[in-house]
């Protein structure tokens, strides 16, 4: 089938420029950047643009994406960011050079798998400093695990320790949190009797400290996805205005208009639940000019997070395969067959990039 829309346009030059802006600022502070490609389904073209923009390794949560990039000859090294499931270990050892880890059981099984394949693998052991996702909460247990890797697991190399913040528990990365990580690294180093190569201070949210010049010395690695891919979270959601050296129009989602009507803004009849089992509340804005798009939650997830590229257009609602725009205040005369462009939020990119029926077009 030759489906034209929805279409996802990808500006590889803007992605490369974003990567360059970030990696050069990080390099000035002795920080290496792992470019994280999971937000765009690990598109090899994007991975390559990140590499050209100066990231020194590539990271993702999904091994399928590593396989895809390797098949496309995008140079690694590759790091698995989601702590691996036991059933993933054979592919992890085959495909990745390094991984984040938080369970002794998994480390032991990984050592055994490495021995089976005759390969070596680097690990970064994760500490949980309050965000409450992966990582050791008990710091003594983390040091024990590091010691076990160092002493008893010859196929594994303890590359360092790391932390993730600002994802699940919405905990803000601060210089204090980074100092906690550094103090823990010093304890691990004392226990194993050598320096760690990598102290990985987090993701996009931790880049704020590089931007503000408050990242403590010693943090030498970040894993950055969103800020390269979209540059939106920190500039829009955090409201950091002087980060405008990052482009936010790296990806464009274009959808086609399938209906243009004038309708009431308040549903008519007895209200029960919507297609997703929710009981939304509606506000009566009177009569609206409305545009229906051939685009839905199946394509873009939370479509309310899409950012229309033109004035006077707002997303009013959506179901799996439809999106409704309120264009009452738009100067444009919409017609069936027209197209509408959007910038994307992370969740939109996550869905749109991974759908086989969204056409992807790469631009320089
Ligand atoms: C997704 C992920 C990242 C990158 O997150 P961004 O917010 O996109 O920069 C970094 N580290 C881990 C462990 C992750 O899962």
Image (cartoon, grey):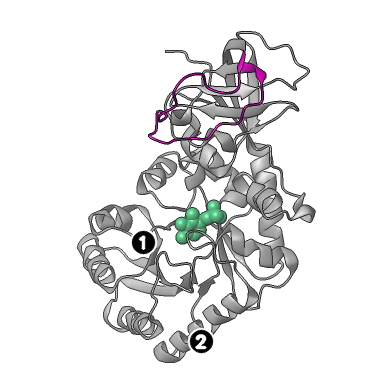
Residue found at x 66% / y 18%: 288
Q: What secondary structure characterizes most of the magenta part?
A: loop
- The x and y percentages for residue 66 are 40, 47
Q: Give the alpha-carbon distance from disc 1 to disc 2, as whole Å.
A: 23 Å
Image quadrant containing the C terminus:
top right
Q: Quadrant of residue 70?
A: top left
Residue found at x 59% / y 81%: 179
22 drawn magenta: no
- The x and y percentages for residue 122 are 39, 67
Residue placed under numbered mark 2 in the picture: 186
Q: Can residue 68 be seen at all in this image of the molecule?
A: yes
- The x and y percentages for residue 292 are 56, 17
Residue behind label 2 places its C-beta within 8 angstroms of ligand 1:
no
Where is 253 relative to 87, above or below? Answer: above
| Mark 1 residue element | loop
Q: How many marks?
A: 2
Residue found at x 40% / y 88%: 192
Q: Residues within 10 Å of mark 2 (few under 14, many from 20)?
A: some
Q: Nearer the viewer, residue 132 or 62?
A: 132
Residue found at x 60% / y 31%: 283
Q: Which mark is residue 83?
A: 1
Q: Can residue 52 be seen at all in this image of the molecule?
A: no
Q: Which residues are magenta?
A: 263-290
Horizontal side of 21 relative to 358 (left or right) equals right
Residue found at the very far front of the displayed protein: 270
268 drawn magenta: yes
Horizontal side of 340 relative to 46 (left or right) equals right
Where is 306 relative to 322, above or below? Answer: below
Residue found at the very far top of the displayed protein: 336
């Amino acid at each position: 089938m030759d489906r034209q829309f929805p279409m996802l346009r990808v500006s590889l030059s803007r992605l490369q420029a974003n990567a360059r802006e970030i990696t050069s600022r990080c390099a000035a502070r002795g920080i290496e950047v792992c470019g994280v490609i999971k937000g765009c389904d690990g598109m090899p073209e994007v991975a390559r643009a990140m590499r050209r923009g100066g990231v020194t390794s590539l990271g993702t949560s999904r091994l399928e994406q590593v396989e895809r990039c390797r098949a496309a000859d995008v140079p690694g090294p590759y790091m698995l960011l989601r702590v691996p499931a036991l059933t993933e270990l054979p592919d992890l050892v085959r495909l990745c050079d390094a991984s984040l880890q938080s369970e002794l059981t998994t480390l032991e099984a990984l050592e055994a798998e490495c021995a089976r394949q005759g390969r070596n693998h680097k690990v970064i052991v994760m500490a949980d400093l309050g965000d409450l996702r992966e990582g050791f909460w008990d710091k003594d247990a983390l040091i024990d695990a590091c010691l076990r890797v160092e002493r008893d697991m010859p196929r594994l190399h303890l590359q360092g320790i790391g932390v993730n913040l600002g994802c699940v528990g919405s905990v803000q990365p601060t210089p204090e949190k980074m100092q906690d990580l550094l103090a823990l690294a010093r304890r691990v180093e004392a226990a194993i009797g050598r320096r760690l190569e990598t102290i990985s201070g987090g993701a996009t949210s931790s880049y704020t400290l590089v931007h503000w010049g408050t990242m403590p010395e010693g943090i030498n690695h970040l894993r950055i996805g969103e800020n390269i891919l979209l540059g939106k979270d920190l500039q829009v959601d955090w409201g950091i205005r002087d980060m405008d050296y990052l482009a936010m129009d790296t990806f464009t989602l274009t959808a086609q208009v399938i209906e243009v009507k004038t309708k009431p803004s308040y549903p008519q009849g007895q209200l029960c639940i919507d297609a997703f089992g929710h009981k939304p509340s509606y506000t009566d804005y009177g009569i609206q000019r409305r545009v229906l798009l051939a685009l839905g939650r199946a394509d873009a997830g939370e479509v309310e997070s899409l950012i229309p590229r033109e004035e006077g257009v707002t997303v009013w609602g959506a179901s799996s395969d439809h999106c409704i725009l309120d264009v009452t205040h738009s100067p444009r005369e919409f017609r069936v067959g027209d197209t509408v462009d959007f910038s994307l939020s992370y969740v939109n990119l996550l869905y749109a990039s991974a759908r086989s029926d969204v056409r992807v077009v790469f631009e320089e």
